[in-house]
Amino acid sequence: MLDLQERKKLSRLAEKNETPFFALSLERLKANEKKFLKELHSFFPKAQACYSVKTNPLPQVLKALGTGFELASLEELEAVKSKKVFKVFNGCCKREKELKEALKQEAIIIMDSFSELEKLIMLKKKLGLKKLEVGVRLNVESKFGIELREIPKFLASAEQQGLKVILLHAHPGAGKSLQEYRQFLQKVKKALPLHSWKFVDLGSGFPSFARLAEQNVSLQQYFQLVKEELGTTLLAEHESKGKELGTTFIFEPGRILVADAMFLVCKLHCLKELNNEKIAILDAGINVLQRIVLENFQFTPLIESNGAKSVVRLAGPLLFGNDWLGTTNSNLQEKDLIVVENVGAYCHSLAWGVSYKKPEVFLV
Ligand SMILES: Cc1ncc(COP(=O)(O)O)c(C=O)c1O
């Protein structure tokens, strides 16, 4: 929830700048990072967090974070070039120039297919590399990775060609409930005994802190599931070989770090009534607040008034019939400023340039 100080800061920004605009709170971002790492390391002291850059690649965000990075393109690699941190290079369509840059930055390349494996082997030969450590993505959802039954064949092909496979990667998809997350872990668990994994990278899938609070669920419950479902299997594997647990977990948080660190301030330009429904037209619509983001956006007046509240349907400015944003129960007037919270993940990176330019970003 927006606090009083933040409200004041947003009001000051709105006095000087045209709406709509984004406001980024580095304070919130750093607090989320600290909270995430504290919980993570209380369960897995050696674990590595790699921020998923596509969630919000603004330079201010990348500069502020002290985590490693999960990267998915040359553009993203370029954006973190100067940071000497732990990096994984992901994606299902890696081009040679991207692979070269990933190698240069010593990122662990996560192989998505047999085709990619062949290409990397060719590149390794071309560059005269003696050894190369890579990862492999397990298919648990959608078009990504390699099926469980194909993993042994993949491992054998890679090792035959002098590639050392050290990392198993899987991602559950966005905003998973505890139950869905457990099911995801149970799929990953099946791949653990196939190899001696130095790293097990579990992607993300954590809801934003705001969503977790709404659902009365904690991040600890997610890590507890990892411990229950995977920790004991890994431990047993290593103990049976007379070794200590040598596997390091990697997580690739995105929305949980940035979602509530950014606000959108927009303006109500027109109130109208259609078919007995009150409609408010705002200057930001689905061009900025896309459904694919999967956040539960809340729209609140920047300055709350005491007048009688009524249900208003909110629409954006686009000449598209589906430019609806949701409803609010407020006392709204034309020219009111409206704040939308939890817009830090994907909203800016996905914002369309149709009819209007992307809103500017200010620090708050
Ligand atoms: C492979 C991978 N890792 C991490 C993330 C970040 O996920 P989230 O924003 O849900 O934390 C994504 C997002 O799509 C992803 O595809």
Image: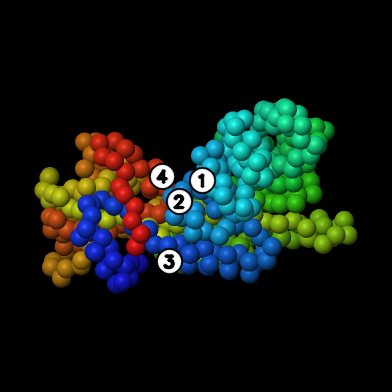
Check disc 1 and give the amino acid type. Answer: Ala
Query: Mark 3 or mark 1, which is nearer to you?
Result: 1
Disc marking residue 226: none
Residue of label 4: 349
Which residue has dot 3 on it?
27
Residue placed at 78% from the left, 58% from the top? 246
Distance Cα–Cα, label 4 vs label 2: 12 Å
Left-right relation of 206 to 163:
left
Residue at point 49% right, 59% down?
Answer: 64
In front of the other: 89 or 290: 89
Q: Which mark is residue 59?
A: 2
**Are discs 1 and 2 less than 8 Å apart at CB?**
yes
Which residue corresponds to the image point at 80% horizontal and 32% vertical from the top-left? 161
Q: Marks 3 and 4, Cα distance to the nearest angstrom?
A: 21 Å
Left or right, residue 296 beside residue 233: left
Q: Amino acid at mark 3?
A: Glu
Q: Dot 4, how many residues are within 10 Å of its Cα: few (below 14), some (14-19), or many (20+)? A: some
> Looking at mark 3, is its residue's CB closer than 8 Å to ligand 1?
no
> CA gap, disc 3 to disc 1?
22 Å
Of badges 4 and 2, nearer the viewer stands: 2
